Amino acid sequence: MAEVPEHDHKVDTGKSVLSLEELGHIQPGMAEIMPLIGVRIWKCFYAGKARNRELAKFQLKEAINLMEKGVLLRPKYTDNMYKFIEEECAVLGKLIDSEDWDGFEAAFDNMVSAANAYHEVYDKGFLVWKVPSEAPGDMDFTPRKR
């Protein structure tokens, strides 16, 4: 382990005391973040199929927040991740906002294809994401009336 400078800050978790360097080593990588993104995208899809604008928009926003966290932790993905956000996610977001549910499914398919193409770029072509055939059982996708 590298020599810790005298002014190194410590983080007390209540169970252990970690240096900032040690804390850095336990930050999640893309292997931990991408499944979380996948769950949000899965929920976004089924919210869109249910024509639940608020839920679809929320799930997409949360997926994008996780993508941004991913590039903060793994900067090598920055350019392509922001390109994906600014292109595929933005198109999907506009369709959700306008409640264009017919266009939503086609754009969603394009977004999934683009995501899988990026897996190829990073030599992870064996990772082929698909929308699960059933909606997640932990959420009611029925739109709420206001």
Image (cartoon, rainbow, N blue to C red):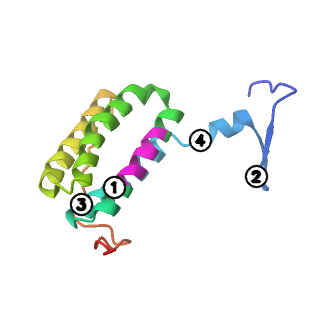
Q: Viewer-nearest of labels 3 and 4?
A: 3
Residue under pointer 1 = 57
Q: Main secondary structure of the magenta part?
A: helix
In the image, residue 93 above or below residue 22? below
Left or right placement of residue 5 versus residue 45 in this view: right
Query: In the image, what residue type sits under mark 4?
Result: Gln
Location of the C terminus by quadrant is: bottom left
N-terminal of the pair, mark 2 or mark 3, is 2
Query: In the image, what residue type sits under mark 3?
Result: Gly
For disc 1, the neighbor class at 10 Å (few under 14, some 14 to 19, many from 20) is many
N-terminal of the pair, mark 4 or mark 2, is 2
Residue at x-position 25% and y-position 54%:
96
On residue 27, which mark appears? 4
Residue 1: say if magenta. no
Q: Secondary structure at mark 3?
A: helix
N-terminal of the pair, mark 1 or mark 2, is 2
Residue at x-position 38% and y-position 26%:
79
Q: State how far apart marks 1 and 3 are (Cα).
A: 9 Å
